[in-house]
Amino acid sequence: MSPSLASQRFARFRPTVETKFHIDYDWWEKSGRSFRLSLRDQLCEECRDRFTNYSDTEDVDWVDPDTGEVRRTDALRECLRQRCANDPDYINERLPLASACFRVFLANNNAPLSPTELNQFMPWKAPESILRTLAGDQVYLGLRPVA
């Protein structure tokens, strides 16, 4: 596909409240930003105290609850899923909207969700408001539509 055809195709793409979004890890790599530092920033206070150095953590076994598959994973992610995500105040209306969405994706193993689905985790924000943030010109925390 020629560059002009590709740009026309993407220019017509207008996300809706049903468009699925996720954390785009390629965006993190290309932007030169530290995903691990941002991940550590999303941890609860107890886990941040446990992991004072975000870059030097061990890998741990993680069991996928849907498939039962055991995989090696980053201890920061596992702490977030097992400890932080279970705190009822982990995702709250005091957070910036992009951070709240980022936490939802981190907690659900980055399963794609639409703004309508994200609203179930953040009932204080309308799906249209979530869409405006996620589909705007600026990319926040690598949150992008699923290709």
Image: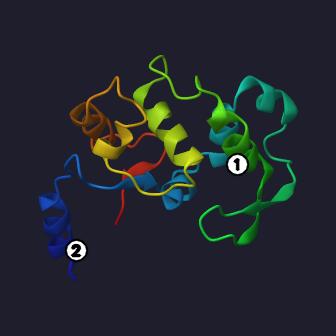
Task: Look at mark 2 in the image and give the residue it sits on.
Answer: 3
Element class at badge 2: helix
Label 1 crowd bin: few (<14), some (14–19), many (20+), radius 10 Å = many
Classify residue 72 by image quadrant. bottom right
Disc on res. 62:
none
Label 2 crowd bin: few (<14), some (14–19), many (20+), radius 10 Å = few
| Residue nearest the observer in this picture, 110 or 87 | 87
Task: Look at mark 1 in the image and give the residue it sits on.
Answer: 77
Q: Is residue 36 left or right of residue 32?
A: right
At x 33% / y 42%, what residue is drawn? 134
Q: Quadrant of the N terminus?
A: bottom left
The earlier-in-sequence mark between 2 and 1 is: 2
Q: Position of residue 70 (x, y in %)?
A: 75, 70
Q: Position of residue 101 (x, y in %)?
A: 45, 38
At x 37% / y 41%, what residue is drawn? 118
Residue 7 to residue 42: above or below: below
What's the amino acid at mark 2?
Pro
Residue that extends furthest to the top in the rendered view of this protein = 94
Q: Position of residue 65 (x, y in %)?
A: 64, 61
